[in-house]
Amino acid sequence: MMSTGPGKPLTKGVSSDWTEWKTLATDAGGGFSCYFNRGLVLSQFVARYMAKNRLTPAAFKKSLQTNGDAKFRAFLEGDLGLRMVGLTQGAGDELHAALYELGDATLETALIGLGPRLHLILANGSDRKGDGNKDARKNLNDHGIATIDRMLKSKGLGHNKFVVVSEDGEPKKVWTGSTNWSTTGLCTQVNNGLLIEDAAVAAHFRKHWDLLK
């Protein structure tokens, strides 16, 4: 509708036909699948949630880390969190991961569940004072998961976020994207994940993993 002036009725303007219905899906074709979270982009929505539940920013972050409100956390992480956990659920699959940050109870539990099928290069994250992944590293080590510790003076050099999934010893697919394996990466920052189901691409990432090791 268009305005014809103050106090005058609206008139019908130029219009077009409605487009056909489209279904949003993760499958982007060609072996590529894209996943997204919601994060705190809905800032006013999150502010109202915190006020309603009388949460300080610190208490809110702790609630996300401990899965205190599983329903709200699931809302924030969207399809992204589900797929990241799903990477660890393939029966017999072997994972070679190179991670910059690791710090989330749900993701750590999922990785621990892989046992000896997990091969993890873990950097020291973004903490300028030391090892930003100290707690997660200890958690995995205490549960029998040996980590390849990539401790770098320049934090940005360890900024890897990929996981190669192998079946019967052969790389089949690779996970990459902007998301760190942390609560902030999943629930507070706005991030994405990309699953590439291509054996040749996965083999390239596996070769890079071997070089990092």
Image: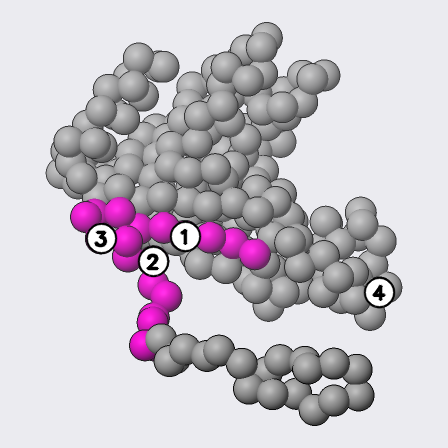
Residue topped by disc 1: 35
10 Å crowding of disc 3: few (<14), some (14-19), many (20+): few
Q: Quadrant of residue 126?
A: top right
Cα distance, mark 3 to mark 1?
A: 13 Å
Residue topped by disc 2: 26
For marks 4 and 3, the one nearer the N-term is 3
Cα distance, mark 2 to mark 4?
A: 33 Å
Viewer-nearest of discs 4 and 3:
3
Residue 155 drawn at (x, y percent): 58, 16
For marks 3 and 1, the one nearer the N-term is 3
Location of residue 85 with respect to 143 vertically, above or below: below
Q: Amino acid at mark 1?
A: Tyr
Q: Amino acid at mark 3?
A: Gly
Q: Is residue 35 magenta?
A: yes
Q: Do tag 3 and tag 1 residues touch (Cβ < 8 Å)?
A: no
10 Å crowding of disc 2: few (<14), some (14-19), many (20+): some
Q: Do tag 1 and tag 2 residues touch (Cβ < 8 Å)?
A: yes
Q: Do tag 3 and tag 2 residues touch (Cβ < 8 Å)?
A: no
Q: Which quarter shows the C terminus?
A: top left
**Highlighted magenta segment, given as a residue range:** 20-38
Residue 95 drawn at (x, y percent): 30, 36
Q: Amino acid at mark 2?
A: Thr
Taking 196 as reference, is 75 left or right?
right
Residue topped by disc 3: 29
Residue at (15% x, 36% y) in the render: 199
Q: Give the colour scheme of this rendering.
A: one colour
Assign a secondary structure to mark 4.
helix
For marks 1 and 2, the one nearer the N-term is 2
Viewer-nearest of discs 2 and 4:
2
10 Å crowding of disc 4: few (<14), some (14-19), many (20+): few
